[in-house]
Image: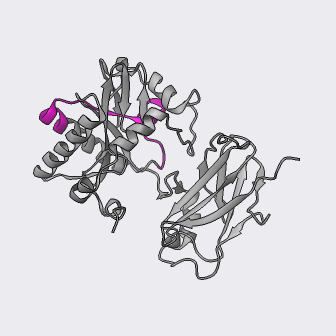
Amino acid sequence: MARQSRFKIRLKDGKGDTLVLGGAVPDLSPVTLYIDGVACGTSQPVPPKPGKTRPTFKFAIKNVRNVLRDGMALSVRQGGRIVPDVNGDAAWVVPENFASGALPVVDLVKSAGEGLQINKKGHVSRPVTDDAKDRYLKAYRFARDWFDRQLGYAVLVSHGTLLGLYRSGDLIPNDDDFDCLYLSAKTDTAGIVAERVAILEAMRRSGLKAEVGKTGHIKLRSHACRLDLMPAWLAGDTLNISGYTSMPGGRALVRNPGTLPFRDGQVGAFADPEPFLVHQYGAGWRHPNPGFRSIPSGAERANRQALRPKPAEIIAFGGASLRLTLPA
């Protein structure tokens, strides 16, 4: 008989600020997290690891003591099946004295029906408003013009932002960032890292609010929103984008970029995004999957490691959360 699927709970980040809920399930169909019976998040299981036989899923809830409240019940379903916890119970009940109560979870549960969700990064995210979309467009135009003026580089929408705009003509609901790439003239990670420092210094001199992200991208704050600006470069015929993409044959994608409509304007994009979307999200990219997680290739993991900011760059350009990762 196949072993029954179970989920387990653990706290991480030293202070228990992040709750991780995960386990093994029979197949790769999406898994849904419920809080007090209300669907609040979706996770896409990943294939079994070597030596294992079943896919696994994971949810993370950050700032959890401000999100959950004592007595609330967390349960998991895959399709119509309940996935019990390690004790065989249908739900895990938040214990007494667990939560701070700063953000009562009743607000989360009430708002889930209005679109609020726990996203795959573990943050409680709200649907993107029309006002936020307008500000994203203004911030994109600002970044596009800055890179063109300073470096002659194109700025294109990428990854989740490109997926939403190409698939449905709009941003993915509950997406909490705006993904862009800047197409560098550099050809290796060492050149990208050195250039990133120069770009951040130039942005700071211009009075811009810019930081380095933990995966090596630039976080630019403009028009009361944030753009994630990922370095992109060509190594031979392979297109690399930050530590997320290493796509053989990708040179053709950036040869003659096009545009996509967004709100009352246009944003730069690959002229034909479909080869990229298939590479990044698989053949099912046309079907929304809020819990999708990509599995990085060896080349992508190597790029991610090479682009990870060093302590000196974190001290100079890192946000508070990133500086906390430095050794004492």
Closer to the camera in the image, 42 or 165 = 42
The furthest residue to the right: 1
State which quadrant residue 306 falls in.
top left
Residue 53 screen position, x and y as percent: 74, 42
Residue 55 screen position, x and y as percent: 68, 44
Closer to the camera in the image, 120 or 319 = 319
Closer to the camera in the image, 187 or 261 = 187
Q: Please tell me whether residue 159 belongs to the stretch shown in magenta.
A: yes
Q: Is residue 304 left or right of residue 143?
A: right
Q: Residue at x 73, y 62 (%)?
A: 85
Q: How is the image coloured?
A: one colour
Q: Residue at x 21, y 57 (%)?
A: 316
Q: Please tell me whether residue 284 belongs to the stretch shown in magenta.
A: no
Can residue 183 be seen here? The reply is: yes
The furthest residue to the bottom: 97
Q: Is residue 328 left or right of residue 149?
A: right
Can residue 264 be seen here? The reply is: no
Q: Quadrant of the C terminus?
A: bottom left
State which quadrant residue 243 falls in.
top left
Q: Residue at x 68, y 54 (%)?
A: 23
Q: Which residues are magenta?
A: 145-174
Q: Is residue 251 left or right of residue 99?
A: left
Closer to the camera in the image, 59 or 300 = 300
Q: Residue at x 30, y 29 (%)?
A: 233
Residue 139 screen position, x and y as percent: 25, 44
Residue 14 screen position, x and y as percent: 48, 70
Q: Is residue 155 left or right of residue 247?
A: left
The furthest residue to the left: 205
- Placement of 151 over or under 322, stated as above or below: above
